[in-house]
Amino acid sequence: MSEFQPEWLPIVVGSVPVADPQKAWELVLEFFPEMPAWPQLPRRTYLENMYVQYSERFPGVVLEEDRIYVDRNRDLDPELEALYVAYLENDVEYGLTSGDYAAALGLLLEGKVRLPQSPIAIKGQVTGPVSWGLTVVDQDRRPILYDDILADALAKHLRLKASWQEQELRKISPQTIIFVDEPYMASYGSAFVSLDHDQVIGLLEEVFAGISGLKGVHCCGNTDWSLLLSTSMNILNLDAYEYADALLLYPEALGDFLERGGMVAWGIAPASTKAESETVESLVQRLESILDRFVSKGMPREKLLQAGLVSPSCGVGSLAPELAEKVFSLTAGVSSEMRRRYVPTGETEEEA
């Protein structure tokens, strides 16, 4: 993993507001050719909702129109047994995500996506266990994360999902990046979420254990950043447009993370209507100001510059297509300018 150099490359979060998978790929490849990610298409079908998308074969799962839940009244023992056997035998195929649930991923794996160049890496993503477990409920509308049996099963289920995805993406690129998307980490520590530190770490590390390449966490809200920074992830992806100063509260944890080779994907391009009034220049200035504040807290500037990636603040699946394209354009533009300033020779790995 030490061979991977972030070099302020642009990286995308996942969802796009396009229903056609080929058009979605065209959009991603236009702005993220170096490290493309297969796009999630929540407007294509409910099956591509970020919680439904990874629900295939989960014990007791029920999909109704615009609703997903786990029926605890069913006899789940046979399904739980099948999951645990797959987990113990490392049967990665159990974690398959079919084309019905991820059409753009299906196109890629079928060889129907023409990558414009040999990519530096291919990125995939799975929904994280905290967010999945707090969003998906049982028949009585109780989050399954509060059921010890289902919470444990969930982490193992998502581990197999991540492992299968990485296995398939490696057929296309030897360097893979798998993000664990955890928007609900923003609720950690609140009065509405009863989870302790060790439980969260255990759930995340179970999923990470299924990923042998680079692994990241995307959280688009504020959270206890020291918790995430203490895990075995390689890339922290945060909404730097809104919450960079919150990360400043954890200089020691961030310093340790960078020291062990961790990277930060700065979500500086706002995935909202705020992007309408921003330019590449204004966002670069904002990012430079953020880096200055971290340096003032004792972070070595060189470490920060060596560890940086650029991303949108969040997925753009809920935005108007024109606005989503601008967010992507801003992300790519900020990446280009930061590379011009800080990457020696300004060459990409393909050009070198």
Image (cartoon, rainbow, N blue to C red):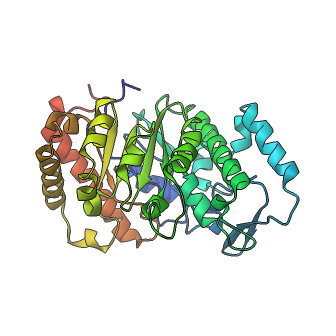
What residue lies at 88% left-to-right and 49% top-to-bottom?
78
What residue lies at 75% left-to-right and 71% top-to-bottom?
139
> 132 or 27: nearer the eye?
132
Q: Is residue 90 above or below residue 17?
A: above
Instruction: Count numbered badges in the picture.
Output: 0
The spot of residue 27 in percent (x, y) is 42, 56
The spot of residue 5 in percent (x, y) is 31, 31
- Taking the image as drawn, is residue 101 in sight? yes
The image quadrant of residue 256 is top left
From the viewer's perspective, tell me whether residue 55 is left or right of residue 300.
right
What residue lies at 44% left-to-right and 54% top-to-bottom?
26
The image quadrant of residue 277 is bottom left
The spot of residue 77 in percent (x, y) is 86, 51
> 12 or 67: nearer the eye?
67
In which quadrant will I find the N terminus?
Answer: top left
> 33 or 221: nearer the eye?
221
- Taking the image as drawn, is residue 111 in sight? no
The spot of residue 74 in percent (x, y) is 86, 63
In which quadrant will I find the C terminus?
Answer: top left
From the viewer's perspective, tell me whether residue 31 is left or right of residue 251.
right
From the viewer's perspective, tell me whether residue 334 is left or right of residue 164.
left
